[in-house]
Image (cartoon, grey):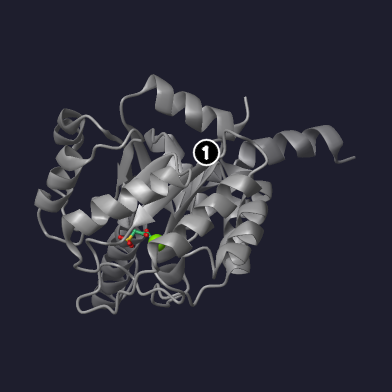
Amino acid sequence: MSSVKRLRTRLDETGLIHVMAAHSPLSALLAEEAGFDALWASGFELSALYGLPDMSLISMTQHLDMLRLIAGRTTLPIIADIDTGYGNAINVIHAVHEYERAGASAVVIEDKTFPKVTSLMAGGRQELLRIEEFQGKIEAAVATRRDPNFLVIARTEALIAGLGETEALQRAKAYEEAGAEMVLIHSKKKDASEIESFSRAWGGSVPLAIVPNAYPDLDAERVKALGNIRVMIYGNYGIRAAATAMRETFRRIIADGGVQNVHKDILPVEEIFDLQNVDSVKAAEARFLR
Ligand code: SPV
Ligand code: MG
């Protein structure tokens, strides 16, 4: 079954899917091992991996290259975070064509202007497109996909921009009318009140996706009780976990004057060999090297 179909099937079979951010093939392999349903090719994580803020500085080519590498090393479907679609509806046509060919199963396009500013930054300059213009981008994405199962998800940043629930609902409804099959509603509030209120007020017929980065208390049990949220994206947890582990380990090595203490607290190299699938190389050596 194609990964595009697998994402659809998983969504149909499960009330709620859990999607982990991936910024590299290694992080994708670890997410797959842990049991996530799909991967989020996160713009925030890839920007952070490059040591850059998430403000349209990473090019589409850089993001696509990483997505292709991830797709080559995991069987999980990938939801691509394509930010604003890299420009207008014409850029979206090009992007959707490229992302589908690269192995993505879905794209999320957000209704901010290009260049975007990362959503969770305090005091971030958040400018939204006119609704009609963003509808054109969604229609362009839907018209471009080759596989009808390729999922086009519209993300509204109305709450992030401080425009309130009425505007968020109006935008979400307009994007559904334009052909989006799911709406991602994002919030930077430290509790889940905005998301829960939006979910209760949502009268559309397409399901919702959320990214509980700012409001971690909203767990799967509470999400299921809301009834219309089908996707939980853990948007920056991979890079934060990696940075936490590296910072602490590096700090200890300097403080200890060597690796004598940390070595037992990090993965043994044999486990990295497993992640690198070294066994298959050994088998190929035995078979083909003469
Ligand atoms: C990402 O992971 O790139 C996201 C989620 O878009 S957030 O950074 O919270 O906006
Ligand atoms: Mg993003």
Residue depicted at 24% across the width and 76% down the height: 255
Which one is in front, 256 or 67?
A: 67
Q: Which residue position is annotated with label 1? A: 77
Give x and y (percent) for residue 38: 44, 38
In the rendered image, is residue 277 in sight?
Answer: yes
Give x and y (percent) for residue 180: 45, 44
- Looking at the rendering, in which quadrant would you find the N terminus? top right
Quadrant for ligand 2?
Answer: bottom left
Which one is in front, 238 or 99?
A: 99
Q: Quadrant of residue 213?
A: bottom left
Give x and y (percent) for residue 140: 58, 54
Identify residue type, mark 1: Pro
Give the side of residue 15 with respect to residue 194, left or right: right
Residue depicted at 12% across the width and 50% down the height: 192
In the rendered image, is residue 103 in sight?
Answer: no
Give the side of residue 1 with respect to residue 232, left or right: right
Residue depicted at 33% across the width and 74% down the height: 127
Circle 1 Cα neighbour tier, 10 Å, few/some/many (<14 / 14–19 / ≥20): many
Give x and y (percent) for residue 124: 26, 78
